[in-house]
Image (cartoon, rainbow, N blue to C red):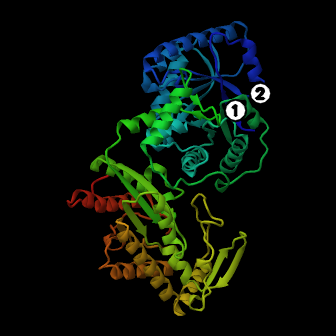
Amino acid sequence: MPDIYQFIKYDSETSIESLKTKCESGAIICFDLEDSIFNWIDETKGPVLKQNYRKWLNIILRKLNAGAIPLKIGIRLNSFDSGEQQLDLESIPEGTKIHTFLVPKVETAFDIDSLAERLQAKNLNISEIIPIIESGKGLNNLERIVSCKNPVLKMGFGHCDYNLSIGAFPFFHQDSTEYWKWVNRIVSVLTSHNCTFINSAYLNLSDSAFFQSMLAHLQFLCQGNFGQFTLSHQQTLLCNTFSKQPESIAEIGRNRLDLSINKEMLLSLKSTFEAENKGQGFSMTSDTKTLISPQEYISAKQHLASWKENTIHFTFVGGCFPVQSDILFEDVFHRILAKKAEDNLNVNFNVNIIRYEKFSNCLQKIANYHEHRPINYLVFHIRPEPYLRIIKLYYKYLNSGNKLHGSLNLPFLGILNPEKYDLLSVGRRNGYAARKSRSGLYDALINCNYMLGYLIGNHYYAKYKYLSLVKDVIEYCNNQKIKVIILGPAIRSETFFEAILSKKLEKFMSESLKNADANYIFGLGKQQDKGKKYFQENGIHATELYHTLIANRVYDAIGEEETGQHIHNVPCD
């Protein structure tokens, strides 16, 4: 059973008996002094609300002290930088037994060490201090935080503040792979320190089935060592009775491919939050019983305040690169590109991603999207993977029944299963990037498979079929008045022969498209910088440095088009 931390509502009428009942679930009942007791619509009323809640909490704690009632109590303080944390501590009677202090927006080890010193001075009986990571800075400093002077045995995650800190909208919640990339990064650090991960609260209070699947994925990810923040008695009961088998990310997470924002979306969330709010904290939708966080409300208002007159609609057509499983959303190339364009070109920058594995249906995917949505710039990514799959003599694939099969690749005889079964529709949808250990013999067999396919001429079919697709995309874009950019392939180097074939593909494409009516950007190739690690050890997955490189190159092309001036390598923040 996971460790459970249930946030409860409280006021001047809260009785000790009601608290005893809540504690029977085994959860640590948590009193909030932070975001849920603030008036986000009329912020002038916020300080008075906080003052009232501190007074009510003080009364409750004094009653517990007087009766020597041993309840497991948790308190979420305000952050160190807010100026409110010291007032929170002053409202807690000296000598009180507090099981858990939850510390939000922790970004440095100092945040925890300084709090521990002040708590010790108040002579409080404390079992644990749990920092909560709620910003990119906190995540980047996680190793230092978990190694601070005062032992950190548990670490929480607050995804609403995290979304706000990176400027996301709409927010990424637990049904998105973007959310789980953050969690995976945190857990990977905590595991080596034997530190328990406490998962962020799930805001859809009526979706018990997904809540259980979320717990099942945490079981898979954390090997049973995890906790959960809950927002209702029902969620706490689901934690207590949890017995599902572990589930992989593919069972619950989906990539968000359309990242566009429009003014109507922003105004809709703002008006819904204000209409459903009761004067403090979260709002709840009347139809789905889903909480709208004040952080997403703030994000909507910030986006409205910075809304520009002009919008660039950007579509990227490629593979897994824009949704790479081990690169955080804020570090992926299109996020870096969007921020640079918005900061330097004074535009809104909307991103849409179209993924393709097969040549045969790629253009239709583009046309289908453009039939309903605008495209100003389209980047078509030439990828080694579909080219390499066709070159292989022997190809293993998942059929429509998700069964593993194998067949010869003989494209000139019409036997071509890489073009028959789309990897995006069967199997391998999502997953955390990792490479299993392989023997030298296994790599030699892969190289041999490529060489045999190469010798019978599969590479001719693959490269000319690919070139035909690229030219069709360029023609379509030109006819539709879409500015098209061709992004050349990276050099895939998982095996020796893959690197050779990838280089041949880049040379063939760059030379064949010299006179095409499109801007060609090298994926690495001739502009490779010596000594920089653009790819991970597996030779397949890009590093954050490569994402930044591609963001810079694409920005240069768009910036020159928009301004009519030569722009080169505007640095990323």
For residue 4, the mark is 1
For the residue pair 101 and 512, the one nearer the viewer reads as 512
Above or below, comparing residue 267 to residue 176 in the picture: above
Q: Is residue 134 visible?
A: no
Q: Earlier in the sequence, mark 2 or mark 1?
A: 1
Secondary structure of the residue carrying numbered label 2: loop
Determine the CA span between mark 2 and mark 1: 9 Å
Above or below, comparing residue 1 to residue 507 in the picture: above
Label 2: which residue?
Answer: 25
The quarter holding residue 469 reads bottom left
Residue drawn at 33 percent across, 48 percent down: 342
For the residue pair 547 and 195, the one nearer the viewer reads as 547
Q: Is mark 2 in CB contact (under 8 Å) with mark 1?
A: yes
Residue 125: percent from left, percent from top: 63, 18
Q: Amino acid at mark 1?
A: Ile
For residue 534, the mark is none
Count of numbered marks: 2
Q: Amino acid at mark 2?
A: Ser
